[in-house]
Amino acid sequence: MSVERNKILARRFYEEILNGRKMDVANEILSPEYVDHSAAASGLENFKQYFAMITNVFPDIKVTIEDLFADGDKAAIHLTIHGTQLGSFRGFPPTGRQATWSGMDIIRFSNGRIIERWSERDFLNMLLQLGHVQYPQ
């Protein structure tokens, strides 16, 4: 696979699956052996369940790709994520508030599909905006 093809797959992951909610695209571009290391979701079906949970918490979640770099079988993506918390998140009750936070992902490709993803999210900034935590006075 070429680096350009990998970039296209990465963009499709965010734009069609995460933003477009097209799970048929997940079947097409994610490997059946897909592992999301940060979500502890191994396998395509576990990814779908994890994503359903996230969209239950943030039904309007939208991911914007700020930067995308690819080399060899990996891509690095800098993201901005925006959503309104309407469900419980990791024990925090819904607030109805909106938040915008950043994230970084590394995606690995194999045989024309996405096979692994590592994610880091600025959850502290998100929790501050949602009113769940405060900076010490």
Image (spheres, helix red, strand yellow):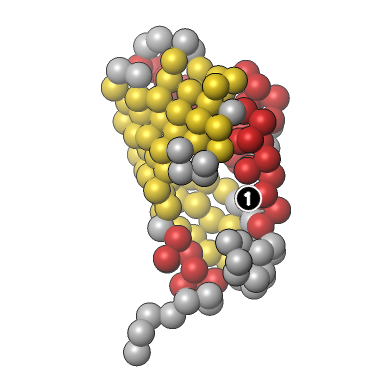
Q: Is residue 67 left or right of residue 54?
A: left
User: Which residue is painted at 40% across and 25% down in the image?
Assistant: 108
Is 29 located above or below residue 49 in the figure? above
Residue in front for this viewpoint, 31 or 13: 31
Q: Position of residue 58 (x, y in %)?
A: 64, 56
Hey, which residue is sitting farthest bottom in the picture? 137
Q: Residue at x 66, y 57 (%)?
A: 57
Residue 44: give x, y in percent of width and height: 62, 28
Foreground pick, 102 / 119: 119
- Which residue is denoted by mark 1 in the rendering? 54
| Residue 102 picture quarter | bottom left
Residue 116 lies, in percent from the top left, at 45, 28
Q: Residue at x 52, y 41 (%)?
A: 40
Instruction: Say which quadrant the C terminus sits in.
Output: bottom left
User: Of helix, strand and loop, which one carries label 1?
Assistant: helix
Total numbered labels placed on residues in the image: 1
Badge 1: few (under 14), some or many (20 or more) residues near its Cα, within 10 Å? Answer: some
**What is the three-letter code of the residue carrying label 1?**
Ile
Q: Is residue 93 visible?
A: yes
User: What residue is rendered at 43% in x and 80% in y?
Assistant: 134
Q: Which sits in the foreground, 80 or 89?
A: 89
Q: Quadrant of the N terminus?
A: top left
Up/down of 48 relative to 113, above or below: below
Task: Report whether residue 65 is seen.
Answer: no
Residue 104 position, x and y percent, is: 38, 44
